[in-house]
């Protein structure tokens, strides 16, 4: 492209330090959200609590789906029989397994989203820094 004087003009914007950082983060697919320290602590505590609870409950449902002598499986089957619903064992096992896997996936998603937050003044993680590592020997 040329300007009015006939000289060549580069139309690409010149990157600044902050823009380079955002561009490299978006290329990697990671975007951190900088929040106040109090909110960071709250998000970290509750996202970890929800994630761990979901994964544990998910594994309990998987256990109930794979074992015939399961505490959780007996509770679900007993509750359904109290209501008057009869479900075949194969269907019950499949439903319990799907619920278990969904719980584990939900916990992993909550934990992943919770790790995107960082407090003001916190440095970047070691993998994001441009400094060389001293682990040569």
Image (cartoon, rainbow, N blue to C red):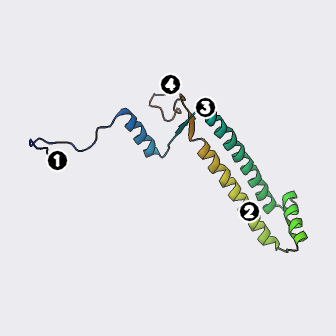
> What residue is shown with label 1?
1
- Asked if residue 131 lies left or right of residue 36, the reply is left
Label 3 vs label 2: CA separation?
39 Å
Residue at the image point whose x is 50% and y is 43% from the top:
31
Foreground: disc 3 or disc 2: 3
Establish if 4 lies above or below 91. Answer: above
> What residue is shown with label 2?
97
- First reached walking from the N terminus: tag 3 or tag 2: 3
Residue at the image point whose x is 89% and y is 66% from the top:
78
> What residue is shown with label 4?
134
3 and 1 marks in contact (CB < 8 Å): no
Label 3 vs label 1: CA separation?
48 Å
- First reached walking from the N terminus: tag 4 or tag 2: 2
The image position of residue 10, as x and y in percent, is 21, 42
> What residue is shown with label 3?
37
Foreground: disc 3 or disc 1: 3
Q: Residues within 10 Å of mark 2 (few under 14, many from 20)?
A: many
Dot 1 falls on a residue whose secondary structure is: loop
The image position of residue 2, as x and y in percent, is 14, 45
Dot 3 falls on a residue whose secondary structure is: helix
Label 2 vs label 1: CA separation?
61 Å
2 and 1 marks in contact (CB < 8 Å): no
- First reached walking from the N terminus: tag 3 or tag 1: 1
Residue at the image point whose x is 11% and y is 41% from the top:
7
Q: Residues within 10 Å of mark 3 (few under 14, many from 20)?
A: some
Establish if 63 lies above or below 2. Answer: below
Label 4 vs label 3: CA separation?
30 Å
């Amino acid at each position: 492209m040329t300007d009015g004087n006939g000289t060549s003009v580069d139309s690409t914007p010149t990157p600044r330090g902050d823009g380079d950082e955002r561009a490299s983060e978006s290329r990697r697919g990671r975007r951190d959200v900088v929040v106040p320290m109090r909110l960071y602590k709250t998000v970290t505590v509750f996202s970890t609590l929800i994630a761990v609870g979901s994964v544990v409950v998910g594994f309990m449902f998987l256990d109930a789906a794979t074992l015939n002598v399961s505490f959780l499986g007996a509770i679900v089957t007993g509750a359904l029989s109290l209501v008057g619903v009869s479900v075949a064992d194969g269907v019950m096992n499949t439903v319990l397994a799907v619920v278990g896997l969904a719980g584990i996936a939900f916990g992993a998603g909550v934990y992943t989203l919770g790790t995107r937050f960082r407090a003001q003044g916190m440095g970047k993680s070691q993998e994001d820094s441009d400094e060389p590592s001293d682990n040569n020997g």
